Image (spheres, grey):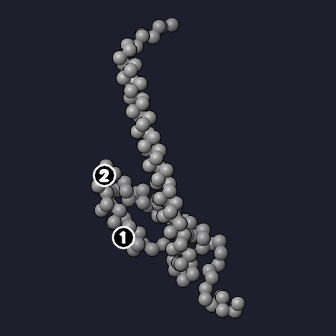
């Protein structure tokens, strides 16, 4: 059985300082994650509103022209460490989930149209 070598006090302090800095940075990431979730929920509420309008007017959920325009705009906004391809992949997932909630809305209830409400 080997006896571990004693760590010197300076390296212990350095490790403790690094751990504190990592904790502070992770707290900032946690705050940003909470903001991202809030923004994604707000975006999804708008996607649901769009889905209701599409359903009422018999429009398709998927609009490839709109998605292409979104990808172009998002990639042009990228000025940080995320490459345009990474931003596109992230937004592909976001848009896929948006289409999913719109489709579930369309499947949940039949559309209410002006013709359907005339008899009431």
Residue 56 percent across, percent down from the top left: 57, 81
Please determine whether, in this image, residue 44 is positioned above or below residue 55. above
Element marked by disc 2: loop
Q: Residue at x 61, y 85 (%)?
A: 113
Residue 65 seen: yes
Where does the C terminus fall, quadrant-wise? bottom right
Residue 115 percent across, percent down from the top left: 63, 90
Q: Residue at x 46, y 47 (%)?
A: 31
Q: Residue at x 30, y 62 (%)?
A: 76
Please determine whether, in this image, residue 66 is positioned above or below residue 90. below
Q: Nearer the viewer, residue 93 or 53?
A: 53
Neighbours of disc 2 within 10 Å: few (<14), some (14-19), many (20+): few
Element marked by disc 1: helix
Which residue lies most toward the bottom here?
A: 119
User: Which circle, 1 or 2, is nearer the viewer?
Assistant: 2
Residue 96 seen: no
Horizontal relation, residue 112 to residue 51: left or right: right
Please determine whether, in this image, residue 50 is positioned above or below residue 114. above
Real-space CA distance between mark 1 and mark 2, rounded to the nearest whole angstrom:
20 Å
Which residue lies most toward the right here?
A: 120
Q: Which residue was labeled with disc 1?
A: 69
Residue 57 percent across, percent down from the top left: 54, 83
Disc on the earlier residue, 1 or 2: 1
* Res 14 quadrant in image: top left
| Mark linked to residue 4 | none
Question: Is disc 1 in contact with disc 2, using a CB cutoff of under 8 Å?
Answer: no
| Mark linked to residue 80 | 2
Q: Nearer the viewer, residue 21 or 89?
A: 21
Q: Nearer the viewer, residue 5 or 89?
A: 5
Neighbours of disc 1 within 10 Å: few (<14), some (14-19), many (20+): few
């Amino acid at each position: 059985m080997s006896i571990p070598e004693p760590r010197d006090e300076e390296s212990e302090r350095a490790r403790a300082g690094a751990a504190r800095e990592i904790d502070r940075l992770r707290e900032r990431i946690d705050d940003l994650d909470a903001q991202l979730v809030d923004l994604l929920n707000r975006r999804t509420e708008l996607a649901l509103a769009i889905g209701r309008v599409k359903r009422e007017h018999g429009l398709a959920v998927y609009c490839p022209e709109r998605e292409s325009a979104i990808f172009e705009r998002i990639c042009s906004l990228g000025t940080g460490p995320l490459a345009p391809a990474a931003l596109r992949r992230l937004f592909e997932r976001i848009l896929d989930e948006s289409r999913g909630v719109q489709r579930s809305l369309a499947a949940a209830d039949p559309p209410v149209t002006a013709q359907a409400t005339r008899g009431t």
